């Protein structure tokens, strides 16, 4: 099953549980017909009353455990393997993995881009899978900067970045903006 199918399945299950809970609350509050009939059998009500106050605490504890389990399932379902979600993970030649925060990588490329002649500011965003990330670069240049030299420097910086990561960007988008004079 794909990630989208899993998410759809969990969404439908959650909506079903919310509908059942809302209906039970409405019947219990007397807002729906049949509110005078008990939802649980007499044996269950007797058991519940015999266990007071521990039965309520047990149900509350079970609810907390189910909520924590649901949170873990949600986090696991939203995690996409191989994506740059704060860290870059590459399998090593041995049994381990190398994990690097993506902010460190983008910061290094930004500092390298600022060495370009006339570069004032640089911003880098990484998206996509770790093996072939999409790289989005924005460089702000001085109005009197040599654009050809800056382009060559940006090209060299991106090539060094890809060589350092050991990957080839699937998509590279470079935007160069000339700042207004006096800014």
Image: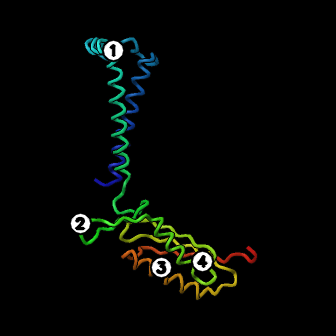
Q: Are marks 1 and 4 in contact (CB under 8 Å)?
A: no
Q: Which residue is mark 3?
A: 158
Label 2: state its secondary structure: loop
Earlier in the chain: of badge 3 and badge 2, it is 2
From the viewer's perspective, is residue 13 above or below residue 172? above
Residue 68 rendering spot, x and y as whole percentages: 36, 39
Q: What's the mark number on residue 5?
A: none
Single out the residue that lies furthest toward the left.
95
From the viewer's perspective, is residue 131 above or below residue 10? below
**Nearer the camera: disc 1 or disc 4:** 1
Distance (Cα) linking label 3 and label 2:
29 Å
- Packing grade of label 3 (10 A; few <14, some 14-19, many >=20) is many
Distance (Cα) linking label 4 and label 2:
42 Å
| Residue in view at x 66 percent, y 78 percent | 178
Label 3: state its secondary structure: helix
How many numbered discs sit on the rendered protein?
Answer: 4
Earlier in the chain: of badge 4 and badge 3, it is 3
Label 4: state its secondary structure: strand
**Nearer the camera: disc 4 or disc 3:** 3
Q: Which residue is mark 2?
A: 95
In the image shown, does 129 or 118 lie closer to the viewer?
118
| Residue in view at x 44 percent, y 60 percent | 86
| Residue in view at x 32 percent, y 30 percent | 62
From the viewer's perspective, is residue 139 above or below residue 52? below
Q: Which residue is mark 1?
A: 52
Residue 85 rendering spot, x and y as whole percentages: 42, 60
Residue 172 rendering spot, x and y as whole percentages: 47, 75
Distance (Cα) linking label 1 and label 3:
67 Å
Earlier in the chain: of badge 1 and badge 3, it is 1
Dividing the picture into quadrants, the one containing residue 13 is top left
Q: Which residue is mark 4?
A: 176
Dividing the picture into quadrants, the one containing residue 24 is top left
């Amino acid at each position: 099953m794909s990630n989208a199918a899993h998410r759809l399945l969990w969404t439908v299950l959650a909506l079903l549980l919310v509908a059942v809970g809302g209906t039970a609350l409405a019947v219990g509050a007397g807002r729906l017909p049949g509110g005078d009939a008990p939802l649980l059998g007499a044996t269950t009500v007797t058991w519940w009353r015999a266990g007071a106050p521990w039965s309520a605490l047990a149900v509350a504890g079970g609810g907390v455990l189910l909520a924590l389990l649901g949170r873990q399932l949600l986090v696991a379902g939203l995690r996409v393997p191989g994506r740059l979600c704060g860290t870059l993970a590459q399998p090593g030649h041995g049994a381990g993995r190398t994990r690097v925060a993506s902010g460190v990588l983008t910061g290094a490329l930004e500092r390298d881009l600022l060495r370009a002649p006339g570069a004032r500011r640089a911003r880098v965003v990484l998206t996509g899978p770790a093996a072939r990330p999409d790289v989005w670069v924005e460089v702000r240049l001085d109005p009197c900067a040599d654009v050809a030299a800056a382009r060559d420097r940006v090209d060299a910086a991106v090539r060094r970045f890809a060589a350092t990561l050991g990957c080839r960007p699937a998509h590279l988008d470079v935007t160069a903006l000339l700042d207004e004079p006096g800014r």
